[in-house]
Image (cartoon, coloured by chain):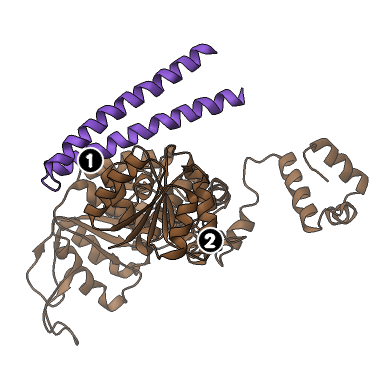
């Protein structure tokens, strides 16, 4: 039971990582829009956000499958 | 510009975070493991460490241990996925450690590097409500008080505030003034503090040369209050033979300055205060009856702190927050400490509570965040009240007997033979009583 709980906690922790990246990349884009950063940084940031969304989705799927297994 | 060490194993996060931290104007270095972080910290001086909680080779707390062992003291901000770490930090770490919760925003990083942590903002949002901008408490007696303040504020009636010393009569006067929305000020004067000769001048003003020392014309408090509020504290300490002058001003709403000939129209509401009880007012010659009826159109009795014990933790939070703000500190209460404060009798009311908290604040160790309370809150004014309030109407004889036995046993450190002797009963009777009450433990 404890092991399962730990696994779930690990998956939740893993999900927070891409969310954290999304948040920071979005902050970077805001800075580009404020003309504080060069424009190409925004394009790179948008691509990274899209990737991070995919990661997030994958982790959420893992959590869903994990709870269905129970 | 700060030297910042960012310790996190997520390369993409550290890359973007570095750009943001550099943009904010600080130098930033990155470590992806505890080992790397330790190397950086050994070789270079850092002002601030942003530290991920979970690292490949251990927990962020290990790095805090490392810093303490090596006598390094940069500010540390733990980056955590879960706010539950807050409780652990409060007990574990010093004032130079705080936390921010993922997902991070730029303002989190800026705020923490500027030492204006979100944590303190959170405590602010948890702060008890300040009613009328100055009153604290959600108990029933206070709710009734708030209703009375609201009602009377809409009128121009004179108010007399009654309550024990230290309950906050001037604060209530300010609350009444604030809720009237008057643009003119509240002017306060203490009738007990002015010498008899100067009372008229203080209340009604004087003309230049009216008496020796009157080098210039002066407005009295009635005039200075304009359309606002005049607060007459300790009204019952005003010499009784001076009170007819006050009566005239209250009745006619006109005052004549000392040495003047022209009457001045006044239009303020008079809020007066006394710490005497109704019974004392009735029997003692402290206030003339006619003056009383003019001043106490709307009498308000302010509850003592013992009548609203549930408000003590709220008051303690507010006072501590004020002290923290004034002294740039971050002390907090533990639940147990708030319970101790709640169960103390506080015969000196809110004033005594505030004084005790201030003293504890000064005595607390600045390297920890937790306040340290003294073992007792003895004040020179407390003892009399304590002893005299031991018996009150409505208590049962059984209850009193039980209390008497408990107090006696405490006095003799639980020695039952000695206690029985003091109580004038046999040891066997004492044992029988103890057995009957059941809840005394040996």
Query: Who is closer to the viewer here, B440 or A23?
Result: A23
The residue where tag 1 is placed is A27
Across and down, in percent, residue A19 comes to: 33, 32
Instruction: Check the image and report above or below for B120 versus B139.
Output: below
| Quadrant in which the C terminus of chain A appears | top right
| Res A63 seen here | yes
Task: From the viewer's perspective, tell me whether residue B324 is left or right of residue A1.
Answer: left
Apparent side of residue B134 relative to residue B81 in the rendered image (left or right): left
Q: Position of residue B77 (x, y in %)?
A: 41, 51
- Residue at image x 27%, y 41%? B150
How far, Cα to Cα, is label 1 from label 2? 34 Å
Considering the numbered disc 1 on the image, is that residue within a helix, a strand or a loop?
helix
In this orientation, which residue lies closer to the viewer: B418 or B118?
A: B118
Any mark on residue B68, and which? 2
- The purple one among the chains is A
Q: Answer with left or right where residue B204 lies relative to residue B238.
A: left
Q: Chain of mark 1?
A: A
Picture disc at residue B356:
none
Q: Nearer the viewer, residue B187 or B34?
A: B34
User: Do marks 1 and 2 share a chain?
Assistant: no
Q: Say whether residue B159 is visible.
A: no
Chain ID of residue with mark 2? B
Kindly indicate the quadrant of the structure image that contains residue B146: top left
Tell me where residue B350 appears, x and y as whole percent. 45, 55
Chain shaded brown = B
């Amino acid at each position: 039971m404890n092991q399962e709980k730990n696994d779930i906690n690990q998956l939740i922790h893993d999900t927070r990582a891409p969310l954290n990246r999304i948040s920071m990349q979005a902050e970077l884009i805001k800075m580009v829009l404020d003309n504080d950063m060069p424009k190409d940084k925004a394009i790179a940031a948008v691509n990274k956000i899209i990737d991070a969304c995919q990661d997030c989705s994958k982790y959420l799927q893992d959590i869903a499958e994990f709870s269905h297994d129970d | 510009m700060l030297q910042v060490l960012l310790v996190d194993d997520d390369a993409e996060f550290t890359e973007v975070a570095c750009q943001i931290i550099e943009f904010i104007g600080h130098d930033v270095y990155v470590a992806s493991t505890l080992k790397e972080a330790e190397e950086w910290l050994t070789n270079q001086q850092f002002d601030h460490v942003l530290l991920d909680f979970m690292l490949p080779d251990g927990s962020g707390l290990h790095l805090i241990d490392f810093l303490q062992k090596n006598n390094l003291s940069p500010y540390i901000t733990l980056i955590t996925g879960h706010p539950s770490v807050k409780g652990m930090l409060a007990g574990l770490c010093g004032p130079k450690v705080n936390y921010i919760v993922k997902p991070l925003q730029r303002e989190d990083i800026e705020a923490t590097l500027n030492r204006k942590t979100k944590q303190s903002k959170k405590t602010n949002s948890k702060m008890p409500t300040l009613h009328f901008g100055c009153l604290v408490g959600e108990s029933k007696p206070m709710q009734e008080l708030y209703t009375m303040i609201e009602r009377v504020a809409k009128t121009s009636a004179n108010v007399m505030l009654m309550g024990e010393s230290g309950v906050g009569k001037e604060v209530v006067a300010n609350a009444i003034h604030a809720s009237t929305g008057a643009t003119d000020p509240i002017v306060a004067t203490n009738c007990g503090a002015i010498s008899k000769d100067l009372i008229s001048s203080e209340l009604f003003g004087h003309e230049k040369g009216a008496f020796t020392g009157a080098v210039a014309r002066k407005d009295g408090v009635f005039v200075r209050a304009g359309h606002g509020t005049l607060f007459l504290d300790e009204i019952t300490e005003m010499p009784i033979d001076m009170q007819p002058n006050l009566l005239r001003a209250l009745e006619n709403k006109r005052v004549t300055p000392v040495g003047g000939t022209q009457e001045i129209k006044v239009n303020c509401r008079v809020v007066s205060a006394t710490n005497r009880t109704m019974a004392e007012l009735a029997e003692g010659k402290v206030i003339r009856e006619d003056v009383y009826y003019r001043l106490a159109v709307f009498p308000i009795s302010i509850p003592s702190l013992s009548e609203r014990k549930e408000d003590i933790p709220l008051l303690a939070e507010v006072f501590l927050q004020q002290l923290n703000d004034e002294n740039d500190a971050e002390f907090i209460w533990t639940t147990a400490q708030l319970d101790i404060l709640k169960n103390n009798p506080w015969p000196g009311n809110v004033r005594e509570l505030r004084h005790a908290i201030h003293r504890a604040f000064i005595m607390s160790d600045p390297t920890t965040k937790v306040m340290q309370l003294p073992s007792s809150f003895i004040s020179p004014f407390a003892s009399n009240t304590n002893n005299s309030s031991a018996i009150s109407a409505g208590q049962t004889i059984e209850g009193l007997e039980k209390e008497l036995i408990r107090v006696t046993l405490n006095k003799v450190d639980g020695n039952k033979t000695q206690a029985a002797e003091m109580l004038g009963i046999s040891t066997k009777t004492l044992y029988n009583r103890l057995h009957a009450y059941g809840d005394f433990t040996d």
